[in-house]
Image: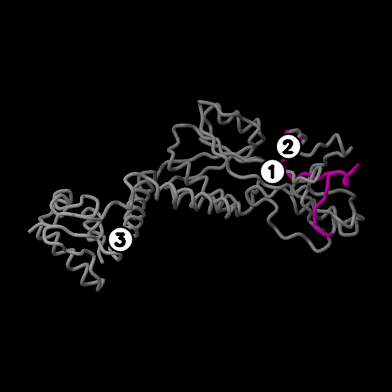
């Protein structure tokens, strides 16, 4: 079975005529008919029921039509993607990430995926919320990832919602907590009253990160405070050595994906029974192509292990494709067959 034969078959069904299909495909009618006979012979099933000068498409032919539409659509998309990757080679995408995001595995994974799937060289910039916004404003970066509340919908940029990540904390197992917290394991902020929260980020971005998290954590209601640590591993080391505190773990883009040490327990952080989430968006300049932006966001979702969101995206795209015009289920009666 050849792609060319599938294209011919689709054209015959869409045009309701061998004559019109041959004209659209730039082949002669005898050549087109020969390809259809060869396709039927290979599949060992009839695709058409001939009625003199007209025909109907068999149930097997209807199935082939539906699947062939999907195959040709995927092939055409693949061609466009391959050409786009080649066209983008030598260009650079400058992407900003928050200082608290992963600096271990993420840079290499992002760089490889973006190059292989868009053709763009990736240059990463880490900074605070304000620094990323300033870099974006002066043209130093093409796109950046930040909290949803940081920017609204502005006409000068594109905004793509990514995902909401649940904030978590790690505590020493020796710390006394309510039985409910140990069973779930979920921890209400009220149980952290007076506790010092350890926050891993760059020292120069500590104040900005604290300010950004205050609304999420309702810090004033639990009487707690923040303490800077250079990394998750350092925060864990301090807790295991007896420091009284809780290490804040933000799994945004692989952050906190490492295994929790045996002496610590990780809890989902809640407030009034609801999980505390950080809503992340990707902001991009409008001169960044929509296809490149879409692929970048898909890569980020994959690396963030947001498989359920990816599945929802694919289902929506499949739904949109199946319901586009013209309908993939036309009337299959009284088509014209050339003599």
Classify mark 2: residues with Cα within 10 Å, few (<14), some (14-19) or many (20+): many
Spot occupied by residue 210 in the image (x, y as percentages of width and height): 76, 36
Q: Is residue 324 left or right of residue 184?
A: left
Picture disc at residue 62: 3
Spot occupied by residue 145 in the image (x, y as percentages of width and height): 59, 39
Viewer-side residue, 171 vs 159: 159
Q: Disc 2 vs disc 3: Cβ atoms closer than 8 Å?
A: no
Numbered label tally: 3
Q: Secondary structure at mark 1?
A: loop
Magenta stretch, residue numbers: 183-210
- Residue at point 85% right, 39% down? 225
* Image height of 125 relative to 313, above or below: above
Q: Give the residue pinned by disc 2.
A: 209
Q: Disc 2 vs disc 1: Cβ atoms closer than 8 Å?
A: yes
Spot occupied by residue 87 in the image (x, y as percentages of width and height): 35, 44
Classify mark 3: residues with Cα within 10 Å, few (<14), some (14-19) or many (20+): some
* Image height of 230 relative to 216, above or below: below
Q: Disc 1 vs disc 3: Cβ atoms closer than 8 Å?
A: no
Spot occupied by residue 245 in the image (x, y as percentages of width and height): 87, 48
Residue 188 magenta-highlighted: yes
Viewer-side residue, 336 vs 242: 336
Q: Give the residue pinned by disc 1.
A: 100
Residue 96 magenta-highlighted: no
């Amino acid at each position: 079975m050849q792609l060319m034969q599938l294209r011919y078959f689709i054209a015959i069904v869409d045009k309701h005529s061998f004559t019109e299909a041959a004209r659209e495909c730039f082949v002669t009618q005898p050549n087109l008919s020969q390809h259809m006979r060869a396709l039927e012979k290979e599949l060992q099933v009839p695709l058409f029921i001939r009625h003199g000068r007209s025909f109907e498409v068999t149930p097997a032919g209807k199935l082939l039509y539906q699947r062939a539409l999907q195959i040709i659509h995927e092939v055409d998309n693949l061609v466009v993607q391959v050409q786009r990757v080649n066209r983008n080679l030598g260009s650079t995408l400058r992407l900003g990430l928050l200082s608290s995001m992963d600096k271990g595995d993420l840079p290499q994974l992002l760089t490889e995926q973006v190059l292989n799937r868009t053709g763009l060289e990736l240059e990463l910039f880490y900074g605070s919320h304000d620094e990323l916004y300033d870099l974006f404003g002066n043209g130093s970066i093409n796109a950046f990832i930040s909290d949803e509340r940081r920017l609204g919908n502005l006409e000068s940029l594109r905004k793509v919602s990514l995902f909401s990540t649940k904030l978590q904390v790690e505590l020493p197992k020796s710390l006394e907590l309510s039985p409910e917290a140990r069973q779930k394991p979920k921890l209400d902020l009220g149980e952290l009253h007076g506790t010092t929260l350890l926050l891993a980020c760059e020292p120069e971005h500590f104040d900005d990160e604290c300010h950004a998290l205050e609304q999420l954590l309702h810090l004033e209601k639990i009487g707690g405070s923040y303490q800077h640590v250079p990394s998750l591993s350092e925060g864990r080391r301090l807790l295991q050595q007896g420091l009284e505190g809780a290490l804040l773990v933000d799994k945004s883009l692989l952050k906190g994906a490492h295994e929790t040490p045996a002496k610590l327990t990780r809890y989902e952080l809640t407030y009034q029974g609801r999980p505390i989430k950080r809503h992340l968006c990707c902001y991009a300049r409008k001169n960044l192509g929509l296809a490149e932006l879409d692929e970048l966001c898909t890569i980020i979702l994959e690396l963030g292990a947001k498989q359920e969101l990816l599945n929802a995206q694919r289902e929506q795209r499949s739904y949109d494709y199946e319901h586009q015009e013209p309908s993939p289920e036309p009337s299959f009666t009284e088509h014209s067959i050339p003599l």
